[in-house]
Image: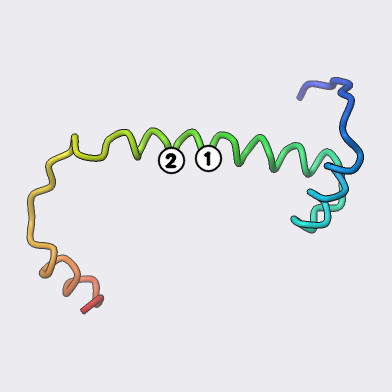
């Protein structure tokens, strides 16, 4: 765990707390950092579009999972 001091925009922090329902500034910052990493992971997955060749029967796969 690292301790640091940062200058935050009070209006922006208040909007983020209201939007997310997160009560503490630390919680908002932790949430924002987690979302940043999640977003970066999604970008990596999107970069695979068109590069991965899937083989299989989509209809059978869905049927096996009870989706059709």
Local SS, label 1? helix
User: How was the colour assigned to the protein in this rendering?
Assistant: rainbow
**Crowd band around label 1 with a 10 angstrom C-alpha radius: few (<14), some (14–19), many (20+):** few
Residue placed under numbered mark 1 in the picture: 38
Could you say which is closer to the camera, residue 36 or residue 15?
Answer: 15
**Crowd band around label 2 with a 10 angstrom C-alpha radius: few (<14), some (14–19), many (20+):** few
**Identity of the residue drawn at 86% across and 23% down:** 6
**Identity of the residue drawn at 18% across and 38% down:** 52
Q: Residue 28, image x and y in percent?
A: 77, 43
Does 67 sit left or right of 17 as displayed? left
Residue placed under numbered mark 2 in the picture: 42
Q: Residue 10, image x and y in percent?
A: 91, 39
**Identity of the residue drawn at 79% across and 48% down:** 16
From the viewer's perspective, is residue 64 above or below residue 24?
Answer: below
As measured in the structure, the alpha-carbon distance from the residue carrying label 1 to the one carrying label 2 is 6 Å
Q: Residue 64, image x and y in percent?
A: 17, 72
**Identity of the residue drawn at 8% across and 49% down:** 55
Quadrant occupied by the N terminus: top right
Could you say which is closer to the camera, residue 44 or residue 15?
Answer: 15
Q: Quadrant of residue 35?
A: top right
Callouts 1 and 2 close, C-beta under 8 Å: yes
Does 28 sit left or right of 50 as displayed? right
Local SS, label 2? helix
Quadrant occupied by the C terminus: bottom left
Q: Residue 9, image x and y in percent?
A: 88, 34
């Amino acid at each position: 765990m690292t301790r640091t001091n940062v200058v935050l925009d009070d209006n922006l922090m208040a909007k983020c707390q209201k939007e997310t329902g997160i009560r503490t500034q630390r919680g908002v910052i932790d949430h924002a950092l987690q979302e940043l990493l999640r977003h970066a992971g999604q970008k990596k997955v999107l970069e695979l579009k068109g590069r991965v060749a899937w083989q299989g029967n989509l209809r059978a796969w869905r049927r096996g999972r009870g989706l059709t």
